[in-house]
Image (cartoon, rainbow, N blue to C red):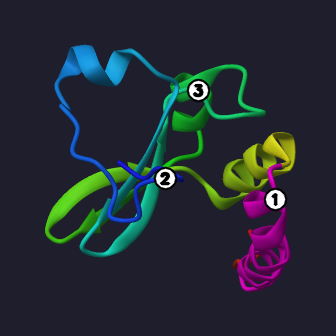
Amino acid sequence: MRTDTEGAGIPFNHDAASLRRTDIWNLTCGYGEFDLAFRPAGIPGGYRELAIHAHLVAVEGVEVYVADLADVIRSKEAAGRPKDLRVLPALYRHHAGKVRHKPAG
């Protein structure tokens, strides 16, 4: 788990009870940093709302649902944290390119 005070992070118990105790986990793994947001900002319907436009993606041979980029952008805009605001220009560019190449129909 990432913290501001422990550069290497701290170990944590990742059972169901532990995961239920908070709205977000800031984690670090061998591939880098990632966050698990159980109640993302700007998504009042939570998982059910995100699932409407989610995409099934294979990650290391495991299929997982990933939020649609438009929903990620909406959440980052709502959160308004400096780290979210810094990444928004790149997400806007990527989303614009993705939409531009979408087939008509």
Give residue 82's mark: 1
Residue type highlighted by circle 3? Arg
Residue type beneath disc 1: Pro
Q: Can residue 3 be found in the magenta stretch?
A: no
Residue at point 77%, 80% (across, down)? 90
The quarter of the picture where residue 13 lies is: top left
Sequence order check, earlier mark of 3 and 1 = 3
Measure the alpha-carbon separation of dots 3 and 1.
19 Å
Residue 30 vs 97, above or below: the answer is above
Magenta span of residues: 81-101
Residue at the location (73% across, 80% down)?
94
Residue 36 in picture, x, y percent from top left: 45, 43
Outermost residue toward the front in this view: 5
Per the model, the C-alpha gap separating discs 2 and 1 is 19 Å
Judge whether residue 90 is colored magenta: yes
In this figure, which residue is indicated by the disc labeled 2?
A: 5
Q: Is residue 63 left or right of residue 19?
A: left
Q: Residues within 10 Å of mark 1 (few under 14, many from 20)?
A: few
Q: Quadrant of the C terminus?
A: bottom right
* Mark closest to the chain's N terminus, 2 or 1: 2
Nearest the viewer among 67 and 39 is 39
Q: Which residue is mark 3?
A: 39
